[in-house]
Every structure is written in C-alpha cells, then in structure tokens.
Image (cartoon, helix red, strand yellow):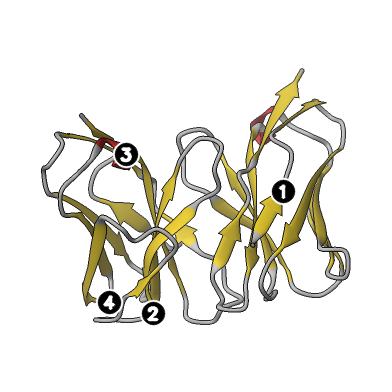
Amino acid sequence: GQNIDQPTEMTATEGAIVQINCTYQTSGFNGLFWYQQHAGEAPTFLSYNVLDGLEEKGRFSSFLSRSKGYSYLLLKELQMKDSASYLCAVQDSNYQLIWGAGTKLIIKP
Amino acid sequence: DVKVTQSSRYLVKRTGEKVFLECVQDMDHENMFWYRQDPGLGLRLIYFSYDVKMKEKGDIPEGYSVSREKKERFSLILESASTNQTSMYLCASRRGESYNEQFFGPGTRLTVL
C-alpha cells in the first residue's frame, strides 16, 4: 500500500532550528512536496524535490533521499509565525499526490 | 498571484440534501482537484479534472460527483448529503505540468446534520 509517515506534533523554541521528517512508501515516485498550513487556512507551497539532495530557500530547506524513501524539512531561525502544520506529499506514478497527515509545529517564546 | 476561491467558507446542510460546492481559479490552470481534509488524516483526493469536460475519480469518489463545464470552474456535488461527509473540503488548481505545485482555495467547512 501507499504510506506517508510524519510526526504528529513537534515543539520548538523561537530562534532555534527544527527538522521535520517524512518517510514514504508509494507506487512510483515523481517528486515530493512540502506545504505549510496555518490553522483554518489553505495549504501553501513550500518546496519540491525530485532529485536527491538539499534544496535551500531562505530559512527553509528540504532534503530528499529516494533510496531511503526519506525527506526532511529544515526550518532555521524559527519565528512565532512558523507555528503551523507542515504537510508532506509524494507524487506517485500516476502523478497524483499522496499526503501525509501533517506535522503540527508549536513554537514557544 | 494565483487565486482560487470557493463559494462558501462554512456550510450547514441536512442529511439527504443536495449540496453544491463551487471552486473558481483565475490563472487559466488546466488541472483542478477536490480534496477532503479530516483530523488525523492526510488530504484525500475525491475527484480531479485535467481539462474542461474531463473528470477522473480519486481515492474516495463514492457519494460525490463533479462538473467542469468551464476551464476556471470545478464544482463538487454531494447528491444526498450524509453525516459522514461532514468535513473540510479543499479545492486546488495546477498548471498542467506535474512538477508544478497545486494552489489551494480557502476551504469549505461542511457540516451535515
């Protein structure tokens, strides 16, 4: 079956660094997306990885290892506004997104 | 900026009613999607459309139908609403190529009593 696993909830301190992991087992692989979703709002796109390695975009970075079925989202210099859910989604062989349940990130002052 | 709008933010309906959820995007995107989002579960795909007049079933199409008569509009229809269809419904659109991200509307929180 197809499965995306990510932690349900994480807590971090303002100004610190946090890494949110995502492991996947899917029928085929055509890229991995990370989205951010604030409570009561729509998901918004953060990153897309299709090749192994690290993609950096400002305070956010995303890493992919296709051989391990593993990705992480790294958030640096955490700000209170980063409190949100982070959704991992894998595009399968049919180019459809399979979504994880999301990781709720709580930032404390 | 891409804008995806949905007809209602909150909707309350009774069991057995026919429910229409409308989604409109303003960036000429070919692909459009309907998802539902429930606590503890990932987004689940109900239906999608690659272009006008086209529709494909997603993972959980039972109890739903869709319509795409115009490129910018994708409607989700609950033929006879049931309590287990109480959920957050999210519409998304995407430019045709698969590596492009999906843009989401604000969602409709539907409660079926």
Element class at badge 2: loop
Amino acid at circle 4? Lys
Callout in the foreground (1, 3): 3
Q: What label does residue B71 carry, if any?
A: 4
* Mark 1 touches mark 4? (CB < 8 Å): no
Amino acid at circle 2? Tyr
Residue under label 3, please give it.
Answer: B84
Q: Looking at the picture, how far across and down is residue B87, in whole percent?
A: 36, 39
- The quarter of the rendered structure image containing the N terminus of chain A is bottom right
Q: Give how far apart the Cα atoms at labels 4 and 2 are.
A: 10 Å
Q: Chain of mark 3?
A: B
Residue under label 2, please give it.
Answer: B50
The first of marks 4 and 3 along the sequence is 4
**Residue B38 as seen in the image, left or right of residue A95:** left
Nearer to me, B57 or A20? B57
Nearer to me, B33 or B5? B33
Q: What label does residue B31 carry, if any?
A: none
Q: Quadrant of residue A46?
A: bottom right
The first of marks 4 and 2 along the sequence is 2
**Residue A19 as seen in the image, left or right of residue B91:** right
Amino acid at circle 1? Asp
| B97 is higher (above) or lower (below) than B10 | below
* Pointers 1 and 2 within a single chain: no
The first of marks 3 and 2 along the sequence is 2
